[in-house]
Image: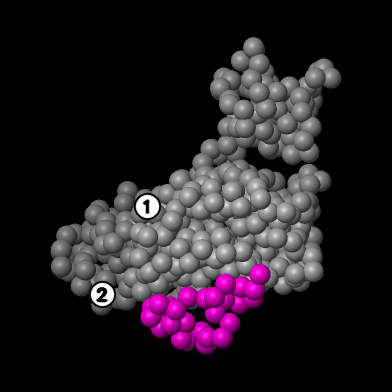
């Protein structure tokens, strides 16, 4: 068994062995269970902890390990959507044998192309998906592009030359994640431990089902059969391993058997916009509204502090649990502040996106604050679509000329002030989430 590590109260640990317990004070658990440390004891080999059901007891430190953050790996040689002539120009400009780049295939969407310079020629090799792996020759199969490139840097293995020098992409890197790192970090769940139930939602990369994990209600996000989206799915999961907050939807674990499943908090009341629309003024109180606003702002202040940008903040991406707590979800577009979103090529929801983000692809915590202002408007209009009287095609023009939405009926003036501050044209003049959170806490204290 491993040496005992030192844990702090609140630390999440995952069981690496079964523990049956020998006394009444012990907390039995099974391999793979996630536990939370409650407090230390005089004996460094024992801790008081609680399980997902809230049951507390003593656990042996040598039977558990800390859950480790899953890191993203830069792919400096990946150039995204560039065509063959551009790839050849980039490589011919330098003319170094073994110089290479990887790009998205133009003729075979979803596949990739490896372009290599050798002896005054550029050779192009199609990288295809086969058997849920990547391959060039149907002989060597790899989990991701990083592993494929690593292989051919060591051995040409049928290519015109082995890969020697990566041609870096200008303007920032793409990132990949290795599936096995989730197992090493203590995030893997066995498919046998899941009961997959009814379909409750559909997303770009996968469907969401209600389910059970060891008897506890969970949401299960299943990757669509098209495994070309696997890296996007894993990048979202990777980010979720690095964040923990009461108002962020938590990753419970990941299944990698056949396809990929993300196991998440179950949020019984669904997304906030549908919750607001379906219940309306007759059910939702002023207290509910300020609570939703404060919960969301609290999560965003946490992300802001960690230099993470969500980039798709909207009421549809905030979920509500059975206790009425709001949690921010959908990290599919989220990324580090210094990550260049222009290369993602995603489509952004115009009505929620800050002008500088639409115009210059400049996403920051300040552009998230703009989106938060729109989300506040959604909360206090009971889920109406923003800019209700302006055609979508004209929204950007109106906003750039200085138009801002009026306060929803019954919206407290203090809340509308926060909205208008969030919608300042100069991002630097918008408040931080930390500042807004304090204002919302003050309002929360006096709202009945």
Left or right: residue 7 compared with residue 353? right
Residue linked to disc 1: 74
Q: How many discs mark residues in the rendered view?
A: 2
Left or right: residue 169 compared with residue 25? left
Q: Nearer the viewer, residue 389 or 323?
A: 389
Left or right: residue 412 compared with residue 431? right
Looking at the image, is 318 positioned above or below residue 388?
Answer: above
Q: Nearer the viewer, residue 318 or 139?
A: 318
Q: Tell me the SS state at disc 1.
A: strand
- Looking at the picture, how far across and down is residue 356, in whole percent? 37, 69
Residue sitting at 75 percent across and 70 percent down? Answer: 280
- As for residue 406 lying within the magenta part, the answer is yes
Residue sitting at 67 percent across and 64 percent down? Answer: 272
Looking at the image, is 273 positioned above or below residue 438?
Answer: below
Residue linked to disc 2: 86
Q: Residues within 10 Å of mark 2 (few under 14, many from 20)?
A: few
- As for residue 379 lying within the magenta part, the answer is no
Segment tinted magenta in the rendering:
384-410
Q: Tell me the SS state at disc 2.
A: helix
Location of residue 159 (image quadrant):
bottom left
């Amino acid at each position: 068994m491993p040496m005992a590590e030192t844990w702090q109260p609140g630390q999440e640990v995952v069981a690496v062995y079964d523990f049956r317990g020998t006394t009444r004070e012990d907390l039995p658990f099974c391999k793979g269970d996630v536990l939370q440390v409650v407090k230390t004891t005089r004996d460094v080999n024992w801790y008081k902890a609680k399980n997902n059901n809230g049951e507390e007891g003593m656990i042996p430190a040598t039977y558990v390990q800390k859950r480790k953050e899953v890191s993203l790996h830069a792919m400096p040689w990946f150039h995204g959507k560039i065509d063959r002539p551009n790839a050849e120009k980039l490589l011919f400009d330098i003319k170094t044998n073994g110089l290479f780049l990887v790009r998205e295939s133009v003729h075979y969407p979803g596949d990739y192309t490896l372009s290599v310079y050798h002896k005054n020629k550029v050779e192009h090799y199609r990288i295809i998906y086969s058997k849920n792996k990547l391959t060039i020759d149907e002989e060597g199969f790899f989990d991701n592009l990083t592993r494929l490139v690593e292989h051919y840097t060591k051995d040409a293995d049928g290519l015109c030359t082995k890969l020697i020098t990566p041609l870096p992409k200008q303007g920032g890197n793409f990132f990949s994640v290795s599936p096995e790192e989730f197992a090493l970090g203590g995030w893997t769940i066995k498919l046998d431990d899941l009961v997959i139930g009814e379909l409750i939602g559909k997303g770009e990369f996968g469907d969401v089902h209600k389910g059970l994990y060891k008897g506890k209600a969970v949401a299960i996000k299943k990757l669509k059969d098209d495994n070309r989206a696997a890296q996007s799915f894993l990048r979202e999961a990777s980010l979720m391993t690095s964040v923990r907050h009461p108002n962020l939807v938590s990753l419970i674990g990941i299944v990698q058997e056949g396809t990929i499943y993300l196991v998440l908090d179950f949020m019984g009341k669904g997304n906030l916009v549908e919750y607001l629309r379906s219940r309306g003024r007759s059910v939702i109180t002023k207290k509910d509204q300020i609570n939703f606003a404060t919960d969301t702002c609290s999560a965003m202040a946490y992300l802001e502090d960690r230099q993470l940008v969500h980039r798709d903040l909207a009421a549809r991406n905030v979920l509500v649990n059975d206790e009425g707590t709001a949690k921010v979800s959908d990290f599919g577009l989220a990324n580090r502040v210094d990550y260049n979103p222009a290369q993602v090529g995603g489509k952004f929801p115009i009505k929620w996106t800050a002008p500088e983000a639409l115009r210059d692809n400049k996403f920051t915590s300040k552009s998230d604050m703009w989106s938060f202002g729109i989300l506040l408007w959604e909360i206090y209009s009971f889920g109406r679509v923003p800019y209700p009287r302006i055609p979508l095609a004209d929204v950007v023009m109106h906003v750039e000329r200085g138009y801002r939405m009026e306060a929803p009926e019954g919206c407290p003036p203090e809340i509308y002030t926060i909205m208008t501050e969030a919608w300042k044209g100069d991002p630097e003049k918008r408040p931080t989430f930390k500042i807004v959170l304090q204002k919302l806490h003050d309002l929360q204290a006096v709202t009945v």
